[in-house]
Amino acid sequence: MDFLQKFNRAWFGGYFEGSPTDPMGSSTYGIYGYNSVLYTIYLVCIRPYITPDTVVLEIGPGRGAWSKTFLERNCRKVYAVDAAEAGHTHFWDYVGKDPRAEYIVAHDFRLSEVPDDSIDFFFSFGVFCHLKPEMCEEYIYSLQRKMRRGGRGFLMIADFDKYEQCRANAERLSIGRFLAEQRRRVWLPAKLGYQFAWRYFRPKMDLEAVSKTKDRNLSSSADAGWYHWGVDRACKAITSAGLVIVEQDVEVVQRDPVMHFKKP
């Protein structure tokens, strides 16, 4: 009882480490309390679902960062579907030769080289945002034939409403908020440097604005842009294809929705 009674004197007002829903709130973990967005996606969307029995379909693997992750999680097989040749993406250079990985060059949106009723887990990140909505929908209609019953999918899409909301709340969602709240003097140079850069160079540091009225946004090259699909239209396409929405957005990225669905 003496030991327990000590807690009556400790942490007056109740122990409070921080708000779990504050995206940039500080905690007692300090510099160890912040994850990469990509690592957070891995923790939430991949690690709980990949087992040695899992057959994965990934659309748009690029160099193969996610594909390699699935293989390291010891999945049974990965179908990696990309519009570019493996020699262009350097997929095998990064992933390494692995008999469980099959690289498929897509010439349409039919996924015809992926066996029907074979996929336990679908994943695509940073890809559908570069496709026009009607192309996304063609992929979804093809995907439902490839997935097994109970199979899950995680899909990142472009939603300009969420994107612009992120920009509008930059002071609350960016690392500047984190630096501003630090009390230790060790952070002072970083805090002052960030504040100066943000004030005078924000156009170069912040996200570029997007607009639904433009034909193409965020065109970093002549061959790629961003296209608004939006959560509502994406949900309609997913459910129309006979798939079930688990979460419209798993909220692992401040800027973009990552949708979670399954095949009943």
Image: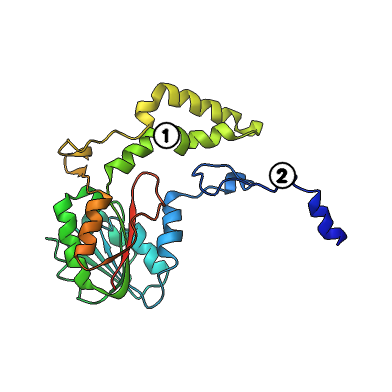
Taking the image as shown, residue 18 lies to the left or right of residue 166, namely right
Label 2, label 1: how far apart the Cα atoms are: 31 Å
Name the residue type under label 1: Ala
Identify whether 101 is placed above or below 6: below
Q: Earlier in the sequence, mark 2 or mark 1?
A: 2
Query: Under tag 1, what secondary structure?
Result: helix
Quarter occupied by residue 121? bottom left
Q: Is residue 181 above or below residue 7?
A: above
Please report the residue visible at 60 percent of the width from the left and 33 percent of the height from the top: 187
In this rendering, position of residue 117 left or right of residue 25 = left
Residue drawn at (35%, 38%) of the image: 165
- The residue indicated by pointer 1 is 170
Query: Where's residue 264, x and y in %?
Result: 29, 73
In front here: 26 or 165?
A: 165
Query: Where 67 sits versus 118, above or below?
Result: above
Against 158, residue 77 (above or below) is below
Q: Residue at x 39, y 56 (%)?
A: 250
Q: Characterize the local packing of mark 2: few (<14), some (14-19) or many (20 or more) Cα atoms within 10 angstroms.
A: few
Q: Residue shown at 39%/48% (left/top)? A: 253
Q: Residue furthest right?
A: 2
Q: Nearer the viewer, mark 2 or mark 1?
A: 2
Please rate how many residues cluster around mark 1, counting C-alpha atoms within 10 Å: few if below 14, some from 14 to 19, many from 20: some
> Is residue 91 among what the camera can see?
yes
Tell me the SS state at disc 2: loop
Does the rendering let one see residue 174?
Answer: no
- Label 2: which residue? 13
Give the image location of residue 209, x and y in percent: 28, 33
- Give me the disc on residue 103: none
